[in-house]
Image (tube, rainbow, N blue to C red):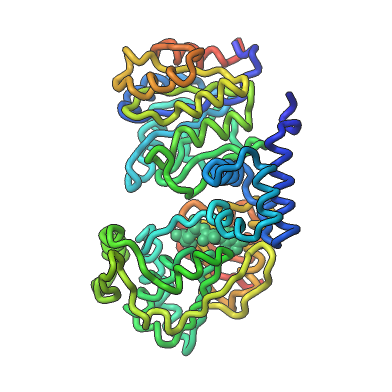
Amino acid sequence: MNDGGITAVAIGASAGAVQALLHILPPLPASLPVPVLIVVHVPADRGNALVSLFEARCDIVVKEAEDKEPAAPGTVYFAPSDYHLLVERDGTLALSADEPVNYSRPAIDVLLESAADAFGGGLVGIVLTGANHDGAEGLRAVAAAGGIAIVQDPASAMSGAMPAAALARCPDARVETLDGITAFLVNLVPA
Amino acid sequence: MMAGDNIEDIEIQLFLEALHRRYHYDFRKYAQASIKRRLVQARTQLGYTSLSAMQEAVLHDETVLPRLLNYLTVQVSEMFRDPSYFRALREKVLPHLATYPSLKVWVAGCSRGEELYSLAILFREEGLYDRTLFYATDINPDALDAAERAVYPLDLIRTYTENHQKSGGRSSLSDYYRAAHGGAIFDKTLRERVVFSDHSLVTDSVFGEMQLVSCRNVLIYFDRDLQDRAIGLFRDSLARKGFLGLGSKESLRFTRHAASFAPFVPAEKIYQRAEA
Ligand SMILES: C[S@@+](CC[C@H](N)C(=O)[O-])C[C@H]1O[C@@H](n2cnc3c(N)ncnc32)[C@H](O)[C@@H]1O
């Protein structure tokens, strides 16, 4: 139940991202009352293959994030390749062509830090499977702003390094399996 | 705590106000989330304990300004970045431009010149260079100097060469530079017909009668009001039926000037000035 005043979900994933997201996103109902913002590390020239992949398998709306568009509930927004995805205070999305952060553009830290600023205690930040440490600083910012920090259980992740790094930086984060994360998100829908 | 009470937010506003009052650089209406990241990065890397301390330094010491500008403006670019954009110009826009006896092209937010020289090479390959005058503008003086020098790190040349080929390049990029001192120095003749100048899309006025304005990955840093202002400038600077090219993630969708332009190559964010 969404009684904690959750207003947005932000997710970061790297190596193993597609399998993990195939577990989490298809069960989400179109009535999910919050936007879901996602950064996946993909090579710069891969275009937006993620959108078409997930669009076909999800009930919830799936699209590529556009600069200055308001983040709407019931919608999954993927960061475009080669741009950072940020959130403004008014809840609109912003893209930037700044230098890569943690060798990545889009970077998970950039999304989580700006989303923590924008949504504060209303944000759920989730760090999934990955082989680097992007997202660790960001998740710490989510928790510091009063939001809910979740990491995928490193032992069950396809690549445990990224959730482990996030957990080290943000020791109070909840540790969940993909099933646990999915259940948490589905429960955001009012009964 | 309420969002507006945050000390850092107060400091950011005061800092941008101070910068504007003291030096006329106006970042107050840049997209906030990104300008905040860059201010915090500048503070950490320039070694100030707070944004207030950095504000004091920049107010009293002019030598801090150039370093600061290199954080506040984003100098990330590439030659023939998004090759499909340059291919669309080559195949769809330049054939129109070829019917004009003389041409003016404005590269707004030219950074260190990567986009400018890409266009210069493109115009040369398509036989239009000699009748074209290019205006390359930016607000960052270091970037403008670098654009005039036209020296790029050799390790980037491979990417530039691939991009150039993908844009439909008819020559070899190596025809335009020579290697020296670890850098690729681009040919002086590419800037014979270029005027470099310090011009801000936020505070300066129109540039007359262009056939093409290319402004890529600059508007993305502005809020909607500033975007409107800049696009108004482009509209007023374009000749009848002139073209406007934006970055791949920029569009006219959210601006009030949308009706002044018609999509020309929508996928590449190339627009044409419509009859008003
Ligand atoms: C990310 S770079 C884009 C470079 C190039 N156009 C490209 O797409 O590769 C953004 C450039 O915009 C410049 N810029 C920022 N604010 C500006 C303003 N108000 N007027 C003109 N240029 C500006 C910056 O100095 C920087 O060189």
- Residue B60 percent location from the top left of the image: 70, 55
Q: Is residue B273 above or below residue B130?
A: above
Judge whether residue B271 can be spotted in this image.
Answer: no
Judge whether residue B257 can be spotted in this image.
Answer: yes
Question: For this rendering, which residue is in front, B229 or B2?
Answer: B2
In the picture, residue B124 is in which quadrant? bottom left
Question: For this rendering, which residue is in front, A141 or A89?
Answer: A141
- Residue A2 percent location from the top left of the image: 61, 14
- State which quarter of the image contains the C terminus of chain A: top right
Name the residue at 40% across, 37% down.
Answer: A102
Name the residue at 32% across, 65% down.
Answer: B167
Taking the image as shown, residue A88 lies to the left or right of residue A179, namely right
Taking the image as shown, residue A62 lies to the left or right of residue B126, namely right
- State which quarter of the image contains the N terminus of chain A: top right
As drawn, the residue found furthest toward the bottom would be B101
Question: For this rendering, which residue is in front, B102 or A169?
Answer: A169
- Residue B46 percent location from the top left of the image: 55, 46
Q: Is residue A61 above or below residue B115?
A: above
